[in-house]
Image (cartoon, rainbow, N blue to C red):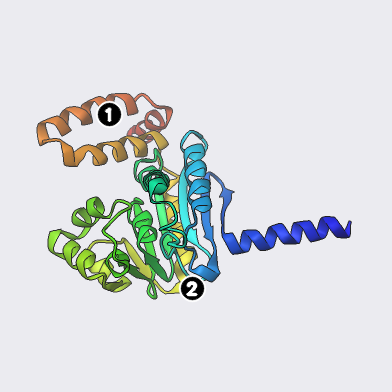
Amino acid sequence: MSADRDDRADRDDRADRDGRVDRETRDGVVTITLNRPDKLNAMTDAMWSTLDATLAELSADPETRVVVIAGAGGAFCGGSDVGGLLDDLDALPDRMRVSNRCVLAVHEAPFPTVAMVDGVAAGSGANLALACDFVVASDRSRFLQLFVRRGLSLDSGASWLLPRLVGDRRARRLALLGDSLDAATALVWGMINTVVPPERLDAEVTALTDRLRGFSPKALAGSKKLLGAAWDSDLAEALEAEIANQVDVIASPEAQAAIGDFLRPR
């Protein structure tokens, strides 16, 4: 028995050192926690792979209503761990594609995604948060596109996300200077949705997810799909896409019930 306990302790120590991606589900709301607090939750290849597999599984599960991504220990995510970055440059594209799939998955998921940011969100960690539908941050949070500080160019979707969220000039400032942006400024710039004191962060995210899971999943998925295509279509194309989507959504049981309730005499 003692040997078994020692083995479990060794595995737990390795998990704490190498990082974990934890998952908890409550009433259709799945909270994914990036868990490597001693390194500001900087993502290892193994953590990205676990997150990739988790998001793919949740996207295929009709019981998933909302996904929240959070970080452990007072930080959201310090980006990707650059340890070993130069060891095998031939493998770098495939390694990057795993983290890129995670960014794309939270952006294109058929359910709302919420980033719960406390503390630092840097590099690919910041962009994972910005790709979510909602970003709720504590007032001690800060956002950094620190690639230039490491001699690197933008990645993990920053070149697409930043101009759309904050505009071209502000995007260039963040990308080319690598400045830290506090939560209050990120809110004014339209980068995030809400700023609250750290002690209110959990309650704020819970209130948001409770509202979201009360809506029709099919309606939310349809609206997300339309918004995602908006940048690549003109108004006429958008109008036609809305018709096609509405015809599909209106046949759902949730839409039928909601419309029936609205029409019922008060």
Give the position of the C terminus as an image quadrant: top left
Of residues 117 and 83, the one drawn nearer to the viewer in this rendering: 83
Does residue 14 appear left or right of residue 192 in this picture?
right
| Numbered tag placed on residue 160 in the rendering | none
Q: Residue at x 58, y 60 (%)?
A: 18
Count up the numbered dots. Answer: 2
Kind of residue at disc 2: Glu
Amino acid type assigned to the residue bearing label 1 in the image: Gln
Question: Image height check: is 13 above or below 251?
Answer: below
Q: Which residue is mark 1?
A: 246
Mark 2 vs 1, N-terminal side: 2
Q: Quadrant of residue 194?
A: bottom left
Helix, strand or loop at label 1? It is: helix
Q: Is residue 228 visible?
A: yes
Q: Image height check: is 253 above or below 20?
A: above
Image-based side of 149 in relation to 170, left or right: right
* Relative image position of residue 150 (x, y in whole percent): 32, 67
| Residue ID for mark 2 | 199
Residue 264 screen position, x and y as percent: 36, 33
Which one is nearer the viewer's eye here, 103 or 18?
18
Tell me the residue at 11%/36% (across/down). Answer: 235
Instruction: Give the residue furthest to the right.
Output: 1
**145 with respect to 81 (left or right):** left
Closer to the eye: label 2 or 1: 2
Horizontal side of residue 219 vs 51, given as left or right: left
Q: Position of residue 31 (x, y in %)?
A: 52, 53
Measured from the top left, where is residue 40 in percent x and y? Answer: 48, 68
Residue drawn at 35 percent across, 69 percent down = 195
Q: CA distance from mark 2 to mark 1?
A: 40 Å
